[in-house]
Structures are given as C-alpha cells and as structure tokens.
Amino acid sequence: MVAGRRPATTAQVPEIARYVLKRLGLALITLVLLSMIVFAAAQLLPGNVGRAVLGREASEEAVAEYNRLHGTDRPAVVQYLDWLGGAVRGDLGESLAQTGVPVWDIVEPALVNSLKLAAFAFVLVVPLGILGGVLAGLRSGRALDRGITVVGLSLAVVPEIVTGLVLILVFAIWLGWLPVTAQPEPGAGALTQVRYLTLPAFALVIVLFGYIARITRAGVVEALEADYTRTAYLKGLPHRTVIRRHVLRNALLPTIAVVATQVGYLLGGLVAIEYLFNYQGIGLMVLQAAQQKDFTLLTAGVMVVGTAYLLVTLVADILFALLNPRIRFGVAE
Amino acid sequence: MSEPTLRVEGLDVVYRVRGYDRQVLRGVSFEVGRGESYGLVGESGCGKSTVALSIVRYLPRNGRVSAGSIRVAGADVLGYRGATLRAYRARTVSMVYQNPGAALNPSLRVGEQVAEAFTVLGASAQEAGERARAALARVQIADPESVLRRYPHQLSGGMQQRVVIAMALAKDPALLILDEPTTGLDATVEAEVLDLVASLQDELHTSVLFISHNLGVISKMCSRVGVLYAGRLVEEGPVETVLRDPRHPYTVGLLRCIPRGGVRKDHGRLDTIPGFLPPLGAEIRGCVFAERCALADDRCALEEPPLEAVGEGHASRCWHRDRAAELPREFVADLELPKVDRTGPPLLELEGLTKVFRQRGHDVHALTAVSAAVWPGETLGLVGESGSGKTTLARTLLGIVPSTAGAVRLEGVDLPPRYQKRSRDELRALQIVFQNPDSALNRRHSVRRILLRSLRKLAGLVGSAAETRMQDLAARVRLTERTLTQKPVQLSGGLKQRVAIARAFAGDPKLVVCDEPTSALDVSVQAAILNLLVELQAEKRVAYIFISHDLGVVRYISDRIAVLYLGRLQELGPADVVFDGPHHPYTEALLSAVPTIDGGGRDRIKLEGEIPSAASPPSGCVFHTRCPRKIGRICEETEPPLVEVEDGHHLRCHIPIDELRRLQGKTEAVAR
Amino acid sequence: MTSVPVPERRSEAAIARRERARALVRTPSFVLGASIIVFWLACALLGDRITPFDPLYDQTPEISASPSAEHWFGTDRLGRDVFSRVLAGSRDILVIAPLATLLATMLGAGLGLVTGYFRGIADDTISRLIDAVLAIPLIVLAVTVVAALGSRSTWAVTVVIALVFAPIIARTVRAAVLGEAQLDYVEAARLRGERAPYVMVAEILPNVMPPILVEATIRLGYAIFAVATLTFIGFGLQPPSPDWAVQIADNYPYLADSWWTVLFPALAIASLVVAVNLVSDSVQQVLER
C-alpha cells in the first residue's frame, strides 16, 4: 500500500503566511521606489523650482528668495528626506499655488470624488467584461467571439476623450438625457450623483471592457482545452456542470489578478475624463497642479494615485493566493 | 449474442488542417472481447490516440469520423447525441491518459472530483463521498481519507494516476481505455500502476484497450495486439505470436530496433527502419509501409494489400507476409570498438562531488560525495529514478551549476567549478547532447550556422577550413547537403538529434555527456542514433556519460554502469555485472520493474512508498525506507560505505556480497 | 489529440509561410485596418496638395458653417474648412507616435533582455523600479514629466512617451527572455564559451522577436492614444498644428453649437487607432494559428 507523499503537512500555514509577507515586503519596497521616482520627476526634474514657478521674467533675486523660502535650494537628498519624513507623518506640505493651504486639504475631496467615479465604473465594467470574455471563450473561433474580441479591443484603444465626446454629443446634447458635466450641485442626493456620473463612467467602461474580456477569454479557452476538462466531459457530466465547476473555476482565478492591474488604466483614464466632464477629481487636480507648476501638490497627487494602484494590486494578489490552492498549500517539488 | 465489448469497423478519421482534409485513420477495424485486454501499438503520429478519442467521441473540433462504425456493448457509438452521449460516457466507457497531473482539476479537492463520478450516476452527495473513499481504497491508496482532502498538486505522479484510475473505474465500465497511462512515470512507479491495472482487471472483468508505444508494456498487459502504422492496422494477433513470429515488415523492423536480451554494443549494431513516416494525411496508393520496406516491389507501391490471416487469429496486411521475417538487414559495417585500458590514468575523475541547492529555505542535497572515474573511449551509464541526481551530476561536471564541494578532474587537472572560468580546451573537451533537440537547437539558426559557430568557438576554425570541417562533420553524422541550409523546425526529431551530436563533436571532445538523448525519439530513430554514437566512439575514442531511464538502452551502450539514488552512488561496476547481479537491492528493484518484450524472467520486487525528498533524506542508508532487503537497525543508523566487493564492482550496502548473491540467485524474490 | 511530430519538409515550411501571408491578406479586418492606415499615411505625405482648402489659413466668409456640399465637414469658427483640416491632421501624430514606439521598443527590448538574462540583483532592482514606474498611470506620469521639464516641444513629448512605454515593453520582453533562457540551446552556447552579449543578441533576441513585434504594434496604438490625450489636455502638440486633438481641444467649448468641428477629428482619431489595432490583432491571430 502506498501512502501519500506528504504527511498532513505542518508547513501549510507558514506557506501562505510567507507568501503574504513576501508580497507585503515587495509592495513596501516598490512604494519607497515610487516615492523616489515621483519626487525626482516632480520636484527635481524642474531643476530650478523658483525659476520654473516665477517664470522667465522674474529677477535672479526673486528666484533665489523663492527657493530659499521653500527650501528648494537645498541638496536633493535633503529635500527628499524632508519631504518623506513629512509624508510619513501625513504632512504633504503646502500648496505652492494656493499659498498656505495644506496639500492634503486639496487632495482629500478630489480623491473622494475620483473614488466615487472609479468605483462606479469598476462595478459596471468587471461583470460586463467577464461576461463578454466568458461568452467569447465558450464560442471561440465563431462569429460571436470575433465580434466581442474585435469590437472590445478596438474600443479599448480609442482614447477616452473620443468616446467621452461622442457620449456627450449623443446623450447630453442631442438626446438631452444626461447632464454635460459630471459635477452635480453641492449637496445633491445619491441618485442625482449617479445621474451625473453615468456618462463619464461609461466612457471608462468602454475603454476597459475589451481588455478584461480578452483576459477572461484567454483563461476560458485554455481551461476548455485542458485535460481536466476532457476528464470532466468523459465522466459524463452535463455541459453546464463542466463549464461551471471545471472550466470557469480555473479560468476566472487568473482574471482576478489581471483585473486589478486595470485599475491603473482606470486611474490614468480619470485625467482625461475628469477634464472632459469638468469633474473635480484627483485627475483634474493633478492636471491643474501641473499647469500651475504647483509641484508640491503635483507630487502629492501622483503619489496618492500610485499608492492606490499598489494597494489594489496587493489586495488582488493576496486574494488570488488565498483562492488558489497551489499557492495556499504550496507546490509539490 | 456474444457481441464483443468494442467493435471498430472500417474507421476513417480526417483532420481539417489549413483548409484541407488530412486522413489520419484509414479503415481501422478491430474488436475487443469481453474481459479481454487488447493492445494498440505504434510510433508517434500513427493515430493511436485518435482511435481512443473517436471511441469516447472526443475528437478535436477539426477532426471527424468520415467513414466506418464504432460499437460498444452492442450499441452504435457514433449515433449518440446529447443525453445518450452523456449516459454512454457516464456508464459504459472510461479513459485514462498520459500526464495524470493535467487530467485532474487543479482547483478542486480530489474527493470532490472522485465523488462527481458517482453523483453523475445519481448518487446522493453523502453516498458519493463514501463511494469515493471506497474507490480510492480499491486502487490501493492506504490513506483514502487524507488523499480525498488534498488538491491534486499535493500528490505525486503515481498517486495522481491512481486517483484517475479510481475515477475511471467508478462506474464499472464495460470498456476501459488506457492511453499511454505510465509514460512519463518512473519505472518503479510504472510497474506499480501496471500491476494495479492488471489486478483490477482480473477482479472486474473489464475490457481494456491499452494504447502504448512500448512493446514491453503491451506484452505484459495484453493478450492480443494490433500494430498501427500511418493510420493503418498492419498486423494483428495474439501478443506472444506477434512478438515471436511477426508477419509484417514494420513489426519485424520495430522489434529488431529495440536493444534487448542483454545485447551490447560490442555484439553488433542495432537494426533501424530507414526513411520517415509519411506526412499526416498523405495520399498513399499502395501499402502504407512500402516506401520504407526492403521487401517492397512494384506491386506494393501500387496496390494496397488486404489484411489476411497468417495463423490462428493472426493477420498481416502485407503481400510478402510469408517472408516478412526475411526482411533484409540494413547494411551496416562492423566496427572495431576501442579496447578500454583501465590501467592507465582515467580521463575524468569525480572526487566527492557534492551539490546542495538552497530552495525555499531548505537545503536540498542533490548530490552527495559522488566519486567515479571515466577512462578514454568508454561509456559510463548513469541510471536512477527522477530525483536521483543524474542530471545534476551531468550539469555539475560540465560546470553549468557549480559544485558545492569536491573536484572534477580532467586528465589529472582540477577543473574550475564554473564553466565561465574554464579555458577553451577545457570547454571543448567536455560537451553535451541534450534530451530534447527542440530545446537544444536554436530554432532561428540554420544547421550551417549552428555548426560553423561551434567550429569557430571550439575548434578555432573560420573560413574555408571551417567549411571543410563542417562538410566532414555533417557527413560523419549523415546529414545531407540540403539539411545544412534548413532550420530545426524543418527537420525530424532524429535529424535534429544528429545536428546536436555534430555540434557536440565540433571541437573533438574527449567526453560527451548524453542526457537521455533518445527518450524523445521513436524506437526506430533511437536505434539509428545509438548506432551513430557507437560509431563515433569507435572512430574517435570519445568517452560517454550516458544518462537514461531505459535500462535496455543503457545496457546496450555502456561499458560500466553507475546507479544513483537520492544523490548517492549506490552501485558502480561493469555493465554485465550490474545487470546480472548480485546487485544492490535498489538496482535489483529497478531492474525487476521494467516490463520486457521477452517477458517473464524476474519476479517483481516492489518498493515501498515513494522516493523521499532530497531536502530531508533518511538517516543511515538513504534507501532503507523502501528497501525490501533491509536487515535491521544498522540500515537506519549507519550509512554503509561504497566498497569494492569484486573486481571493479562497488556496492553501498550492509549486506555482504555473498549473502546478496544467495538472496538474489537462489531463493525466490521477496514478494509482498 | 496529442501532437503529431511529422517531419516537416522544406517545401511544407515554405508553403506554410506563404499560406500565412495569404491568410493575412484574406482576413477582412487586416485589409480594412491596413487600408485606413495607408489612407492616413497618404494624407500625411501629400498634405496640402490634396486638401480642397488650405487647412491652416483659408479664411472663408462662412464662419462655423454646418456641413454642406462645399464644406463637407463644415467650417470652424475661424472659417477654416474642417474637411481639409481633418485630412491634414494625421501629419504630426504619424511622426510622433511611431517614433516614440520605436524608441520605446528599442529601450524596452534592451532592458528586458538584460534583466531576463542576468537575473540576480540587477534584475531585482530594475524590475522593482519598473514596477514602481508602472504604478503611475501613463498619462499622469507623462503630464508630470512634461510639466517638470517645462517644455512642450514635439521632441519632449516623443521622448516622454517613449520613456513611459519602455518599462511596459521591458516587462513583456523579460518574461519572454526568461522562458528562452531556460532552453538548452542557451546552455549549449555557454558551453562553447560564448559571452553574454553574444548569447543575448545572437541567440536569444531572434527568438523573442515575435513577442517584441506584437508588443510594438500594440504600443503603436497606445502611443497614438497617449499623444491624442496629452494634446487634448494641453500637454502635447500645440496650435497651430492641424492635429486632430488640437482641433478637438480648440473647439470643445463650442461643442453644443458646432459639433462638426469636434466630431469629425474625433472620428479620425478613432479610425486610426482602430485600424492599427485591427492590423496588430490580425497579425497575432495569423502568427498563433
């Protein structure tokens, strides 16, 4: 008689714990690197901040005075560490454009607005994308598949400004169903807010749909061709059971991790969409900070966006590990 | 009344490839009677798996049955649709295929998957769970409870295949199809799975269709056999008759290709089958084998012979069936093998070679203090199960992975552990032929470019000198002028392996490591490659370290053999001595596990459990956990030294050689 | 069906190649995409010679006129013919986007080769850096760098987009190289004493060209995407370029009154990116078959 190779292993719990810890550590390192890159791009790249802010006509003295006042004449490393020390304590400095206003006071409401829009778009696009991908995968090679794939991917490469414009033109201007801007009157009810957010959300959905559908489709096609699917069919299981228990279970798992990376595109899309719909979110804020050369605000905005992305992918990775028995229980050597 | 379990008649299957129908099965007919086990044998691409997939109605989307009929248990299978097809698969037919790891759903627990086979028959969830447990017990899994709770990746390959077999037998099928069920498993595991199938078949009286490329396995498992070539059944009959008295030139050739019955390279060359399998779906007017057959005449090329009886239940599809056995041997010149002089200094010495990998916080002892020597012009065979350290040994001595301790000495000079630090002369002296030529040859480079580059780097040749040498080299391994301009994808597996061999010989190496060089090839091609390696050895007095899991092949080509287990050398000695015994208990078990065409001979020695993890090797003798001849505490506590027990024969065992001789020679083997 | 290793003869390989080319030409989506790209390329090359009116300066008396027989796409509020401007609008983007893609591909392929081949500390460091860069959405990063540079020249935009795309390509190439580096031919090369640059460039690179090319065509689509978006929000091409996104940005405030000044350039952008996407998708389909 043959016993299993592994005794009910005691190493099971540490396996997943080690994975999560490792993932957390990596995320932390990436975050530190991110802060360096952002700081370098937004506060060091301009070279002379005073000159950049005050413009070409300003006198040498004024520029020097400005730099002395804002500490931008110090060595880069000192500036970075000073900024990092503040950031860790939640102090992101003061806005350069709106003198004296703490950066966080500008970032926070913008972030809340963007999260509303992003969440709305995400809730719409994930089920739609997965559904489209599953349908295409199950009919791979047929007309429905080609239709979903080609249309989905074509829409995915059309810039949000174009899809957004067309949506505005058709639904707001010609049909008059929905408002042109996304910004409701202050204190508007939830339903009104949803009405205002519908067009911008759909502009984002159109861009993201194709990619999610494609990843899902690839997973489904792979699972359909797998030996274990053949095993399931040859057991005499009905088609629906095979698809549900064997195909989708394995196909959708990797989709989780990939969907999370789409949050990055979503956040990037916010810049154009918020500008187009004149919506006071973090994207528009970053854009205005860049236009006004408000480098402290710009740094904070980019940092917040990057951190949000890292957090979402971290959560998705851990979720993926928890759902995936191969990681949960380790891989046999 | 007594309808056979399976009756296949005139089966034609075509695959649609790039808009054209390509015929892969040509009028295949055979029957499998009740409780009978029928073997279908043939080389890759002959259509074996297509037969199986047609029977279970699972052809790929581009394949279809274009003519013929398949009846299982009296009913027409090709007529099934929807519910009837599901009921047929749920109750009547089962299939087990290669690579059990892929056949199980990675994200469902084993218990859920096995239970499905019962719920589909209408069992309640609880009942299904209980029957799943019983099903695992039936396939001799000692601890069904715990296996049911695991995920497939937590089980070894052998265990996975047991689970798959348990699922296949859940419904007591009328017909069980086994498609290469043990290919890719280690010999000892293969033997266990085969024993299991045989005992279950006795118990259940299931009809079995056994598909394999391995004649030894077929001969062990089946009573009748059909030989498939290019989608045609060319010969059929009782296994013993077909193997003893083959009546189709293809079967004759196939049997002659296989090194068996203790033949060795100094006894003579292996026969080969010249030419290639016709391409998929080729239009063939006459006999499918005519192009490669030495007996073929005009009639064979124009007129297809019928399958005609040549004896009791024995039929052959050949115009020359009565003189098939006289198939002329392909002419190969005899050659003078160099005498190996072991009184002189060895070419290569390994001394205490040790390799420890660091993996997930554990030390994995892949190789522990291996000492051996190779003399000029000889072949040292290296055998052992997967995980025994064969490949690590090869990679360590080549410097691809640096050793942790110990020395590799070439002609008395210590080699740097890493290849980067080795001189050109040291690099050219040690070369390798890999297992998989697809991976070993750059698919973007022409054969010419591959060879010229090696000549430049290893022999320092450029320009016309390199050109001349390349032509010479190509001729030596029998590559045609046209092959030189081609890229690897355009070549067959055998030709690719010839290119790889030519590359290894570009710098006139002193020793070439052959890492399973023929396991990816069909037997007819394997014979040609083995012949080539022997020729090169005779001519250039090169030494080989030859790694293989195929003991027949190792025995054919090796002068001496080293047996590895868990990274330790267990036995080292002249090939005949190691094979004929007395041998190390591990070698003994390994040898007894191999199913041979000649059948019989050894009693199976079963090994307990599975190969332990190299991260935590057992105490004492590493083999004691599985050793059928363990003598007591000493085996668990003290590792025996490797001692020379006879002239040139080294063993690592506490049992004295004479005792081993007595145990293995006279008394019956320890059966379970 | 298990794989059937049939010895493929030379002629068969050649036939397969020709069949692939023919299959591509037979794919409707490829033909459509390629035609559109050729059309816009022709417009960019021929420029003023084919536009019915001068796209930049022609001042007709008709200001903000809706589409008519004379002005198919109407006129804008300066009285310029929108149809002429749309035809002229592909000029700059068809230089910037391919150039940025080319730069990004070379840089990304180089990075990917080095990180995938050497592994170890260099790989870990560069991979972490790439992860960090990729955490910042493309447009946000581009906006930040353009603002920080203080230059909105065509060159700056090209270089910024190339730099932002390079890590993405590097990641794809690295994955492909990791797979290749495990194959035995790489080991065989090392065992005959090849140095790392040779192994990377002569042995591995040719084998990872297909994924690099596929990646490049995908990135080309996104480069057009990025240039258009950056231009629209004011960080890319600047007037008086007749670029489509410049036109949209110019006329967007008057969308409700003269929609044609916005819609037609927008559709032109869409047609170009979709065309690039159709071509890249068909090429992938045929290669994978």
Image: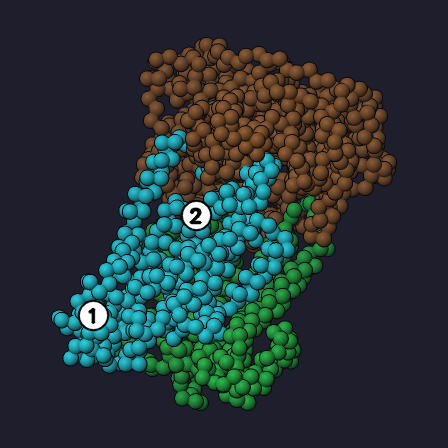
Instruction: Inspect this view and state whether residue C24 appears.
Output: yes
Q: Which chain is green?
A: A
Circle 2: is it few (<14), some (14-19), or many (20+) Cα within 10 Å?
Answer: some
Tell me which chain the residue with mark 2 is part of. Answer: C
Left/right of residue C37 with respect to residue C117 in the rendered view? left
Q: Label 2: which residue?
A: C210
Amino acid type for the residue under numbered disc 2:
Pro
Query: Label 2 to label 1, Cα distance in Å?
Result: 43 Å
Residue B283 in the figure: left or right of residue C161: left
Q: Which chain is brown?
A: B
Q: Residue furthest left?
A: C69
Q: Which residue lies at the image location 46% right of the left edge and 17% below the top edge?
A: B248
The residue at which mark 1 appears reads as: C54
Residue B203: x and y in percent read 60, 33
The three-letter code of the residue at mark 1 reads Asp
Q: Is residue A203 left or right of residue A55?
A: left
* Depicted B85 relative to depicted B571: above or below: below
Give the crowd class for mark 1: few <14, some 14-19, many >=20 residues within 10 Å. Answer: some
- Which residue corresponds to the image point at 71% horizontal and 23% vertical from the top-left? B375
> The N terminus of chain B appears in which quarter of the rendering?
top left
Kindly identify the residue that appears in the image at 83 percent across and 32 percent down: B641
Q: What residue is drawn where x is 63% and y is 40%?
A: B158
Judging from the image, the colouring scheme is by chain
Residue B407 at x, y = what percent?
A: 76, 36
Find numbered disc 2 in the image and state the secondary structure of the residue it sits on.
Answer: helix
Disc 2 or disc 1, which is closer to the eye?
Answer: 1
Q: Of callouts 2 and 1, which one flags the residue occurring earlier in the amino acid sequence?
A: 1
Which picture quadrant has residue B625? top right
Numbered-mark total: 2
> For chain C, what colour was chosen?
cyan
The correct choice, above or below, for A54 with respect to B548 in the image is below
